[in-house]
Image: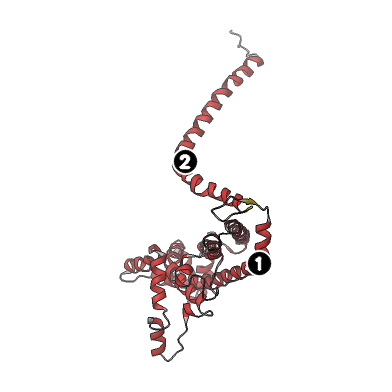
Amino acid sequence: MSTPTLTRPSARLGAKQDARPGRRAQGWKKLGWVLFFLLPSAIPLTVFTLIPMVSSLWVSLHKWNLISPMQWVGLDNYTNLLTDPMTRRVFLHTLIYVAGYLPLVYAGGLGLALVLNQRLKGRAFLRATYFLPVVTSWVVVALVWKWLLNPANGLVNQILGALGLGQPGWWTDPHWALPAVILSSAWKDLGFVMVILLAGLQAIPSDVREAALVDGANGWQRFSRITLPLLSPSTFFVVVISLINGFQVFDQVYVMTAGGPSGSSQVVVGQIYDLTFRYGRAGEASALSWILFAVILVITVFQIRGQRKWVHYA
């Protein structure tokens, strides 16, 4: 009878040590392929996003007018901005914009999604029509709404006058300039919110609605206790994206009001633009952009942590 061969521990240990270089080489090879396929997106991300972000942080610590050499001032730009009444004013205008824009765009998008989720003739055409403003240039949309809201001969005021209602000054009135921007912004983004919420509605299982119908639930009960809770993931996405976009509002303000009249519609990004190109204070503008970044980051983190309490995933 043959005697089994025993492998010495030192031999097994040597085999494991020999295998490690091969595994490391294989791991480096996989990492190399991953980096190779990431290069087409990593290079533009680095050149056009990461490097400008780091550069703006460096500029925010200097006094610079875009022409003469930069002068180191440390955190003075941040201190000046945080004590400047204009900074509080533009942040207040931005918050007012977000507070008016978000409910309006969500309610309108949800209403369109509920209607277009029904079996209607020409439903695909209507969906494309409502989504068309989303892919339209902001400059075009802002110019159209500036004409519609013209206090003298705009279509909106003509309709209001025919109905015997008041005719606001809209973008020429300090009290109505920001509402005019909110109205045009909500109209443009309705299609985007509609598409997201419509996808969420179509993902709700039909048997859940049918069970509620069999149990005798009326339309409001089905909407409030089934549709809205199961739509909460889509709502969460819309709220996060809309808040981030709302705090960065600029194009429509610049085209419709340019921050006026008398600064009544000036927002944070508009102030960053003016500080840089009108007043030659690029250091303060960079510091204000980082303050805005910090505000958006804090609000987004708060939303992500708070979504556990009200977002229900099926």
Disc 1 marks which residue?
Answer: 84
Seen from the viewer's position, the closer of residues 31 and 229 is 31
Seen from the viewer's position, the closer of residues 44 and 2 is 44
Seen from the viewer's position, the closer of residues 129 and 44 is 44
Which quadrant holds residue 17?
A: top right
Give the number of the disc on residue 38. Answer: 2
Amino acid type of disc 1?
A: Asp
Amino acid type of disc 2?
A: Leu
Return the disc, 2 or 1, that comes first in the chain's sequence. 2
How far across and how far down the image is residue 2, in percent?
Answer: 58, 8
The kind of secondary structure element at disc 2 is helix
How far across and how far down the image is residue 153, in percent?
Answer: 38, 83
Q: Residue at x 43, y 64 (%)?
A: 192
How far across and how far down the image is residue 171, in percent?
Answer: 47, 77
Seen from the viewer's position, the closer of residues 230 and 1 is 230
Which quadrant holds residue 188?
A: bottom left
Give the number of the disc on residue 165. Answer: none
User: Does residue 179 appear in the picture of this structure?
Assistant: yes
Which of label 2 and label 1 is nearer to you?
1
